[in-house]
């Protein structure tokens, strides 16, 4: 499962905010500004892609015979 | 009249009691006194009212499902059956279920438990965990049927479709509810990747919400390493679960709204960021373009030939002129020298002597004649003049000693 993607979404968004405020401060050299801008555009694409992700199935969590959790797919 | 044994008497009374329909399953109201919990887990107390009392026992298997703490003085309703404890010859009420009697008792029990758990620090603000802003996976602990779960799933999916949902089904009222809700929270904590838990149910009476006031549920919420949002009943309902949870939502639907961001809003925010970045970079470009134009207007760049080439051209011309002078001077000088040398060479040339009227005579062998005895009469002699050559014949030889 490991939802690294969602952690990275949050990080990407935070980075995007950081880039915007850095750019808005406006005292960067042109070359660096352009680099940050390119990175920012990449991030907006990445974040937008994440937003377009399809609905996921719902899992039902049950207790197995050994007391450990067991997952079952369910269409609700 | 025959005697019967004590045991026979006891068994007869026991049979009599057990054959009674009402005594087999009844509810009794009263106040708890002489409360005692044995090491075995069985519970013993006396249930009394102002006139009478009855001994009550609740076995461990039943006591485990108790949804609140018992104590002396508490008004309760006890459900169970009556029979005789043969050894003591005493009839007893064997309790299957015990509930607080009336709202007053319910609140008293609730307050008691609240103070106990608060003293343990289960409601401490400092230990609250912050729910993640973008949960990838949410665990729901609630009834798998009914409007509540459907509403929550609809809201979660509408706002943030990428979220993964794991439902831990649990009865949310009734005897097994506390155990099932606590188990759901515990199992979700064993699943890797769950970012957030919502535990709750729809509105109901205080009794119906009771599971969320039980010690086992409150403890499971406090023990969860995953942030928990409590979502019990309506806005005005407060439970101990709300106090133990990391965040309290007024309703299950509100919990779903709190749990995930709205995709539309986030999309708008990302678009806004893009617009702001683009505006920044365009402003930046404009500033640089202006600087560039300023530079372009500079004379050096505007008329580069004039400033760069023409000046150099001038220098070059000057150098060329100088070089020309030098070369010409040197040619003239050389010409003078050559004329001088040619003059001197001229004076040395035999041809110059011939010009003055002298001539050269060559013998038949072509050698220059210096003495008369080099020749005989009749020999042919060639005489070279300044201009022209004479072929002569020697007629007479006068030998002299002229040097």
Image (cartoon, coloured by chain):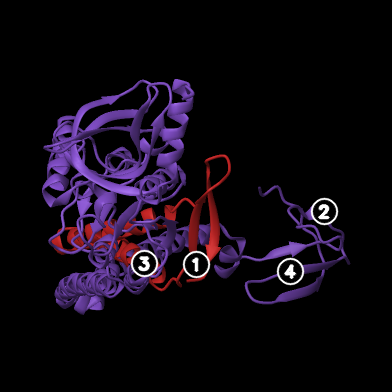
From the rendered image, report the letter of the chain displayed in red.
A
* Badge 4: chain ID: B
> How far is the residue under mark 3 from the one under mark 2?
155 Å
Residue at figure coordinates x 40%, y 32% from the top left:
B84
* Badge 1: chain ID: A
Q: Position of residue B295 (x, y in %)?
A: 17, 72
> Is residue A26 visible from the viewing direction of this image?
no
The disc, 2 or 4, on the residue closer to the chain's N-terminal end is 2
Point out the frontmost of discs 2 and 4: 4
From the rendered image, report the letter of the chain displayed in purple.
B
Point out the frontmost of discs 3 and 1: 3
The answer to whether marks 3 and 2 mark residues whose Cβ atoms lie closer than 8 Å is: no
Query: How packed is label 1: few (under 14 Cα within 10 Å), some, or many (20 or more)?
Result: some
Residue at figure coordinates x 15%, y 35% from the top left:
B118
> How far is the residue under mark 3 from the one under mark 1?
15 Å
Q: Specify whether B382 is left or right of B209.
A: right
Point out the frontmost of discs 4 and 1: 1
């Amino acid at each position: 499962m490991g939802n690294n993607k969602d952690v990275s979404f949050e990080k990407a968004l935070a980075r995007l905010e950081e880039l915007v405020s850095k750019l808005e401060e406006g005292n960067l050299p042109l070359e660096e500004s352009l680099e940050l801008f390119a990175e920012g555009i990449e991030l907006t694409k990445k974040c937008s892609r994440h937003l377009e992700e399809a609905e996921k199935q719902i899992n039902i969590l049950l207790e197995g015979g050994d007391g450990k959790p067991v997952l079952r797919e369910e269409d609700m | 009249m025959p005697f019967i044994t004590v045991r026979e008497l006891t068994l007869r009374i026991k049979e009599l009691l057990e054959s009674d329909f009402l005594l087999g399953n009844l509810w009794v109201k009263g106040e708890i006194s002489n409360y005692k919990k044995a090491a075995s887990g069985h519970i013993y107390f006396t249930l009394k009212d102002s006139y009478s009392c009855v001994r009550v026992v609740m076995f461990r298997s039943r006591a485990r499902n108790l949804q609140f703490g018992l104590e002396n003085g508490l008004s309760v309703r006890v459900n169970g059956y009556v029979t005789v404890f043969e050894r003591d010859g005493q009839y007893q009420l064997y309790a299957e279920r015990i509930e607080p009697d009336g709202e007053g008792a319910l609140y008293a029990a609730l307050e008691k438990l609240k103070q106990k758990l608060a003293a343990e620090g289960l409601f401490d603000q400092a230990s609250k965990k912050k729910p993640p802003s973008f949960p990838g996976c949410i665990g729901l602990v609630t009834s798998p049927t009914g409007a509540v779960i459907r509403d929550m799933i609809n809201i979660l999916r509408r706002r943030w479709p990428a979220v993964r949902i794991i439902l831990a089904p649990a009865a949310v009222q009734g005897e097994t509810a506390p155990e099932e809700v606590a188990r759901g929270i515990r199992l979700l904590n064993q699943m890797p990747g769950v970012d957030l838990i919502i535990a709750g149910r729809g509105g109901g009476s205080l009794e119906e919400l009771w599971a969320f006031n039980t010690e086992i549920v409150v403890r499971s919420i406090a023990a969860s390493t995953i942030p928990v949002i409590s979502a019990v009943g309506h806005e005005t309902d407060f439970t101990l679960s709300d106090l133990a949870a990391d965040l309290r939502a007024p309703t299950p639907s509100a919990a779903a709204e709190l749990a995930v961001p709205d995709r539309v809003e986030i999309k708008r925010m990302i678009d806004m960021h893009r617009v702001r970045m683009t505006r920044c970079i365009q402003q930046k470009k404009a500033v640089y373009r202006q600087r560039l134009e300023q530079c372009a207007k500079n004379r050096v760049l505007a008329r580069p030939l004039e400033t760069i080439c023409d000046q150099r051209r001038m220098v070059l011309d000057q150098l060329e002129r100088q070089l020309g002078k030098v070369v010409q001077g040197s040619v003239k000088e050389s010409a003078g020298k050559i004329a001088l040398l040619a003059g001197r060479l001229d004076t040395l040339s035999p041809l110059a002597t011939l010009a003055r009227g002298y001539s050269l005579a060559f013998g038949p062998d072509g050698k220059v004649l210096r003495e008369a005895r080099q020749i005989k009469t009749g020999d042919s002699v060639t005489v070279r003049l300044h201009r022209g050559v004479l072929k002569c014949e020697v007629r007479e030889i006068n030998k002299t000693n002229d040097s």
